[in-house]
């Protein structure tokens, strides 16, 4: 039996170096029609988890590359009775991590755009090459469907010069495109807009601090709909303590590890990005496990949690000063949406600044935007679930409509 065609929808693709996440959704009704993840691409133990209209299948078997993964995904759709290539799919939206100085809005992909994404790969060597592989793989199998690139850095493109500029030799910075780019921009924009809607206020009238707390974590200060600062920098390494990343660190530590420990740049890169953060401090990067160990009295986990909180509170204070007036503080992403103790502890003792969390509201778990501050709190504190796939789908559809 053939299912209803999925026209009027967008296929959202997020390609990693060895993974491919995808979702088909309607950007108007917000209905998710299909969702899936291909993991361990390039290995013999590859796996695809595929969900379509309430039915889930798991397929194990080698996937040689992203082309093979996409082909297999299309086979799974065909088994569901859907020919994606002939279904009237309106667009494919690709998450691209780094847009450099070239891309600051969603962009219809053509050969020129592909070449420019490839040219700026050195700015995000762990991400952009994989994103480009995903773009090419999907376009080869769905050549008639318009493809749109949505860049993680786009929302922060207009940061004030004082926030975007590093105190580095200006000629060197210019030659090698070194500046603060910021990341998670799709999430920060989506959440900050939804926060304004939740509060019933105009986006341009709300000053807010957004905390995107997941395995990767970042914060932004958004003044009247315009970001004025963010914690991540030229790469996603800077800023908050993360699952496996250091966040802020003295650059001199690189020299020390090179000169004294004899570590290569590549080894230091792996250390900072994959063996540090919470994992480096206590051996765990799953925040739920860290919290369980904290509650059990584990000293290493307690230190990791305290370091994590210290960095959060430092940036909250800094952004309060930068904004001058704070109307809302917003938590989102996996940790931000689900870890009530983090929300309470990061804002503890700030009553003199008009920030009060209601313990009962904070304890509620929900997939909906919700207020967790007290009625007396001068600053609204909210939990607002992020939905980067929906944001990418909406932006991709808007680009396709403009270009039609």
Image: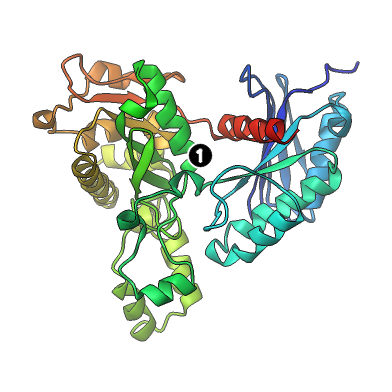
- Mark 1 neighbour class, 10 Å CA radius: few under 14, some 14 to 19, many 20 or more: many
* The furthest residue to the right: 1
Q: Quadrant of residue 18?
A: bottom right
- The residue under the point 17% across, 33% down is 348
Foreground pick, 299 / 235: 235
Foreground pick, 121 / 78: 121
| 300 sits left or right of 332 in the view | left
Above or below, 11 against 317 in this view is: above
- The residue under the point 44% across, 66% down is 178
> Label 1 belongs to which residue?
186
| 401 sits left or right of 98 in the view | right
- The residue under the point 64% across, 58% down is 117
| 250 sits left or right of 106 in the view | left
Secondary structure beneath disc 1? helix
**Would you say residue 367 is visible in this rendering?**
yes
Above or below, 176 against 142 in this view is: below
Residue 191 percent location from the top left of the image: 43, 30
Labels in figure, total = 1
Above or below, 186 against 104 in this view is: above
Quadrant housing the N terminus: top right
Foreground pick, 223 / 234: 223
Quadrant housing the C terminus: top right
| 26 sits left or right of 61 in the view | left
Residue 105 percent location from the top left of the image: 56, 44
**Figure colour scheme:** rainbow
Residue 177 percent location from the top left of the image: 48, 67
**Would you say residue 61 is visible in this rendering?**
no
Residue 173 percent location from the top left of the image: 42, 71
Q: Quadrant of residue 309?
A: top left
- The residue under the point 56% across, 32% down is 391
């Amino acid at each position: 039996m053939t299912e209803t065609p999925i026209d009027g929808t967008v296929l959202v693709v997020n390609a990693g170096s060895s993974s491919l996440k995808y979702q088909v959704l309607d950007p108007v009704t917000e209905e998710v029609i299909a969702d899936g993840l291909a993991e361990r691409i390039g290995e013999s133990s590859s796996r695809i988890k595929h969900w379509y209209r309430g039915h889930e299948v798991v397929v194990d078997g080698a996937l040689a590359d992203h082309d093979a993964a996409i082909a297999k995904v299309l086979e799974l759709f065909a088994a569901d009775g859907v020919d994606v290539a002939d279904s009237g799919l309106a667009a494919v939206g690709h998450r691209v991590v780094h847009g450099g100085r070239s891309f600051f809005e969603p962009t219809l992909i053509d050969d020129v755009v592909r070449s420019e994404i490839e040219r700026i790969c050195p700015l995000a060597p762990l991400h952009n090459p994989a994103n480009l592989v995903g773009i090419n793989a999907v376009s080869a199998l769905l050549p008639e469907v318009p493809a749109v690139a949505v860049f993680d850095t786009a929302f922060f493109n207009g940061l004030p010069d004082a926030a975007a500029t590093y105190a580095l030799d200006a000629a060197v910075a210019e030659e090698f495109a070194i500046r603060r780019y910021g990341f998670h921009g799709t999430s920060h924009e989506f959440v900050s807009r939804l926060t304004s809607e939740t509060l019933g206020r105009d986006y341009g009238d709300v000053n807010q601090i957004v905390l995107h707390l997941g395995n990767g974590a970042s914060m932004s200060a958004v003044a009247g709909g315009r970001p004025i600062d963010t914690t991540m920098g030229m790469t996603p390494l800077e800023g908050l303590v993360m699952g496996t990343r250091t966040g802020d660190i003295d650059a001199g530590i690189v020299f020390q590890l090179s000169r004294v420990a004899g570590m290569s740049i590549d080894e230091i890169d792996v250390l900072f990005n994959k063996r540090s953060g919470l994992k480096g401090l206590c051996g765990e990067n799953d925040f739920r496990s860290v919290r369980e160990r904290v509650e059990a009295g584990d000293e290493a986990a307690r230190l990791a949690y305290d370091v994590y909180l210290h960095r959060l509170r430092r940036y909250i204070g800094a952004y309060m000063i930068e904004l001058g007036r704070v109307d809302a503080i917003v938590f989102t992403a996996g940790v931000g949406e689900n870890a009530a103790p983090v929300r309470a502890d990061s804002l503890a003792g700030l009553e003199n600044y008009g920030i009060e969390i209601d313990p009962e509201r904070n304890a509620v778990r929900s997939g909906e935007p919700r207020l967790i501050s007290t009625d007396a709190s001068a600053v609204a504190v909210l939990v607002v679930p992020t939905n980067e796939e929906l944001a990418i789908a909406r932006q991709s559809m808007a680009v396709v409509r403009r270009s039609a």
